[in-house]
Amino acid sequence: MLLELRDVSVNYGPVAALKNLSVKVEEGQIVTIIGSNGAGKTTTLRAMSGMLPVKSGEIHFEGKRVDGMAPHKIVANGIAHVPEGRRIFPDMTVEENLRTGAFLRKDKAAVEHDLRDVYNRFPRLLERRRQRAQTMSGGEQQMLAIGRALMSNPRILLMDEPSMGLAPVIVEEIAVIIEEINARGLSVVLVEQNAVMALELASYAYVLESGNMVLEGPAVDLRDDETVRKAYLGL
């Protein structure tokens, strides 16, 4: 098992945001977490990446317990987080943003190789490499956020609402990017309001409500589940 949450609970002050949550991600898998606003999806990713402390339970990555570990050490271990809203550095250039993703790495030759790989994957970032990030479109900024995460050379990518605020044609492009990243062996945990896209991309899915896991199973089965179709797919 690549990544596993075991009965994880997270609080915001006195409020329970996650309640005894268990999630598993296998090597090479795309796993999605869907649910309404406030269900705990973003909280789950933040717990995985060490941005929020775990009240109880355990998080294991490649057999090593990582809950309680500093976020930068979690990144160094191979977990990269593409946050909601992209969170790029607006006054830095595209290339400066990308290089911040490799800040912890010492393998300089491999970093340059990975930078070329990101530019090959996202030609628009190469075209705009000296441009300030804040001048780019929303879709380009999302590509930059993904590219920055890839520069840490991760084993698994946590993606929080990558389609948010983007035009439908760009959402389709982001979906293709996720598929291509996964096809090259990178595991993905995808949090998405666009449940239709998420369930099409993922092999396994979890449904959260008010911090509780209420449903899980193969994504193809959840796409056909009547409750999921009515609540999240608009069908």
Image (spheres, helix red, strand yellow):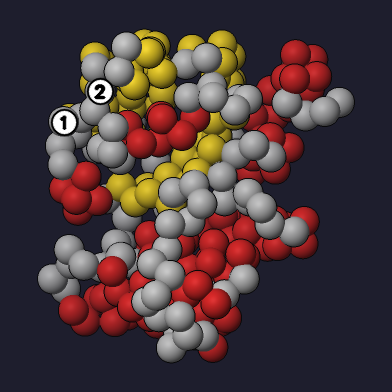
Disc ID at residue 154 = none
Q: Nearer the viewer, residue 129 or 109?
A: 129
Image quadrant in which you'd find residue 38 = top right
Report the residue at 34% width, 21% height from top: 12
Disc ID at residue 54 = 2
Q: Position of residue 67 (x, y in %)?
A: 20, 30
Report the residue at 43% width, 57% height from top: 87
Q: Position of residue 43 (x, y in %)?
A: 41, 30
Q: Is residue 184 visible?
A: no
Quadrant of the frame with the C terminus = top right
Report the residue at 51% width, 79% height from top: 125
Q: Position of residue 7 (x, y in %)?
A: 33, 13
Q: Is residue 30 above or below residue 145?
A: above
| 211 to the left or right of 171 | left
Q: Nearer the viewer, residue 94 or 117?
A: 94
Residue placed under numbered mark 1 in the picture = 68
